[in-house]
Amino acid sequence: MKRLPFILAIMLVLLTAAPLGISAQAQAPDIGTAVAFVDNEGNELGSITVTGIDDPATGLDPDFPAEADSRYVVLTVVFEAAADRRFDIDPFAIVVQDGDGALWSRTAVRLAEDAVVPELGGQALAPGSRISGVVGFALPDAAEVARVFYQPESNRLITLAEVLGVAPPPVGQVFEIADGAGGTGQVAVLDVFDPFLDFDPGSPPEPGNRYLMLWLVLENVTPAIFQPSSSWCVVRDDAGYLWSTGFVPRPTEEPGSARSEMAILDLDSQRLGSGDRLSRAIFFQLPEDAVATAMYVRPDSSYLIAVADLADVDAAATPVSDDED
């Protein structure tokens, strides 16, 4: 693992940089782009298109306004079944994400009497069928719509539309994040090892899978305790699936060996005091053909915050011997 000493050498440089916001353009569909929906068996069942966003919504019954300090946002969505497939659609699986990473579920809206587009309901579409309608959301006035997802299951988020045109930070960029308990810290993904090969030969990945390792550095930059946890971390792949961290057994480390001196320690639940800094590894098991696109943190289930763009990284494969210089 020749790259790790270099990583440790640049750690202090990275952590003295000010936290930077997300600014790069995301490679994601725009409003009006049809997005194919592929099921778990690889069958393309149809497509989903967000054709418009009415923000704040205007075609609603004025007698039923949004609550104070909030507004309604209405999406117009088209579902179309493939010519040879039934498509069971679920408009309640459409999710809006705001610019802070918060996820917002659908809410019922009262349309105006003269509305010409109906509210969209769940139904089965026969092959070749097409249905359109509106889907409503209630968002705080300060929340800006960043993107729209389709969430057919809890561990999958398919991007339907990129509204703000932003992407995760690049690998190596410091990102500031709150822990949900009052603390704030900085995190950076410093390196990516894909596949990770230095595992215990007796504990290989499951057939058809591979291990992925991300090397992180974390620092508490506030007076309060910062409590990062590996359970926050997920990797998203190119099909929208979210993969949680797991433990990867490594060979026994002998004192003085190259592997021992690398000190590859797993991130668990940590309590960092003001000024504390840690470098830690997190591990994932992904299908061999899945492309890791980004790492996110989820301090709770209602947030998905992008920390590092993995899509364009020239990842290193870890060597398996421990006798390197």
Image (cartoon, rainbow, N blue to C red):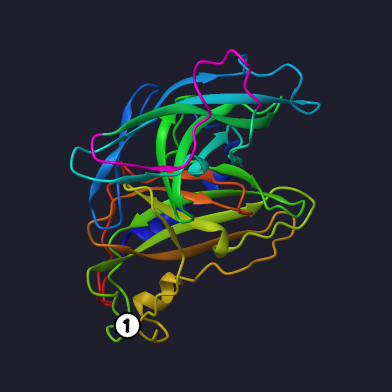
User: Residue 236's spot in the image, x, y percent?
Assistant: 40, 51
**Tag 1 residue:** 203
Instruction: Write the residue at 53% across / 29% down.
Output: 119
Which amino acid, mark 1?
A: Ser
Q: Local crowd at mark 1 within 10 Å, few (<14), some, or many (≥20)?
A: few
In this view, the residue farthest toward the left is: 84
Answer whether residue 316 is magenta in the image.
Answer: no
Instruction: Write the residue at 53% across / 55% down.
Output: 217
- State whether the magenta stretch is mostly helix, strand or loop: loop
> Is residue 309 visible to us here?
yes
Q: Is residue 317 left or right of residue 78?
A: left
Q: Nearer the viewer, residue 198 or 143?
A: 143
The secondary element bearing badge 1 is classed as: loop
The segment highlighted magenta reads 110-128
Q: Quadrant of residue 270?
A: bottom right
Q: Nearer the viewer, residue 271 or 81?
A: 81
Q: Quadrant of residue 290?
A: bottom left
Q: Nearer the viewer, residue 193 or 242?
A: 242
